[in-house]
Image (cartoon, grey):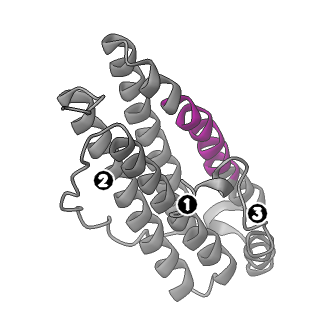
Amino acid sequence: MNTKRLSDMMEKALSDQMNKEILASHVFLSYGIWADDKGYGGIANFLYRHAQEERNHSIKFMEYVLNRGGKPKVEAIPAPPQDPESLSACFDGVFQHEVDNTTSIYRLVDLALEEKDWATWNFMQWFVQEQIEEETLAQNLIDKLKIAGGDRASDESLFTLDKALQDAPNDVPLAQEATGANP
């Protein structure tokens, strides 16, 4: 008996998003390494936590596909972009990556609606809300850096920004529940 409750197109689209989340994890890990190398330990820690959160999102997609009788496929992940040239470029990259991810999430919502796959449509609403939070978080990074002086910020301003991100809570609303064990 076939117990698969996803169309082939939806199964592939969800697998593609799982892989996109893995790529996001690698991008933020790469940015975190860059920040750490530049001496921005707080910013690095923030980016490392964000990398883990993105990985957790990929697990959430993986388990959903499996729970619906499908089989997600892990694809080759492109290399992250080259190191940013500045904190502005780093934070802009984080924001752009989140905007691109939001577009992908919306495409999945559209496909679920088109297919009348209400279970997937409902599943995707968590991600719609999450992307609002992710884009806001990324925009706040850009805003905080601008307040600090942007790429011409003083060492003292950058130290304060770095410290603020170091002291930021380890959890993010909604996403704190998404782990490998509890997607």
Q: Which residue is mark 1?
A: 53
Q: Residues within 10 Å of mark 2 (few under 14, many from 20)?
A: many
Image coordinates of residue 145 in percent, x first then y, are 69, 60
Instruction: Find residue 149 and report its image quarter.
Output: bottom right
Image position of 155 (left or right of 62) = right
- N-terminal-most mark, 3 or 1: 1
Image position of 122 (left or right of 14) = right
* Mark 1 element type: helix
Between marks 3 and 1 in the image, the one whose residue lies nearer the viewer: 1
Please give the name of the residue rendered at 49% of the width and 31% of the height, measured from the top-left corner: 124
Please give the name of the residue rendered at 39% of the width and 67% of the height, measured from the top-left corner: 26
Magenta-highlighted stretch: main secondary structure? helix
Q: Residues within 10 Å of mark 1 (few under 14, many from 20)?
A: many
Three-letter code for the amino acid on which mark 1 is drawn: Glu
Q: Residues within 10 Å of mark 3 (few under 14, many from 20)?
A: some
* Mark 3 element type: helix
Which residue ends up furthest to the front in the rendered image? Answer: 1
Q: Which residue is mark 2?
A: 19
Please give the name of the residue rendered at 19% of the width and 57% of the height, measured from the top-left corner: 75
Spatial CA distance of label 3 from label 1 is: 26 Å
Q: Is residue 130 magenta?
A: yes
Please give the name of the residue rendered at 63% of the width and 76% of the height, measured from the top-left corner: 45
In the image, the segment drawn in magenta is 124-140
Q: Is residue 152 above or below residue 3?
A: below
- N-terminal-most mark, 3 or 2: 2
Q: Which residue is mark 3?
A: 148
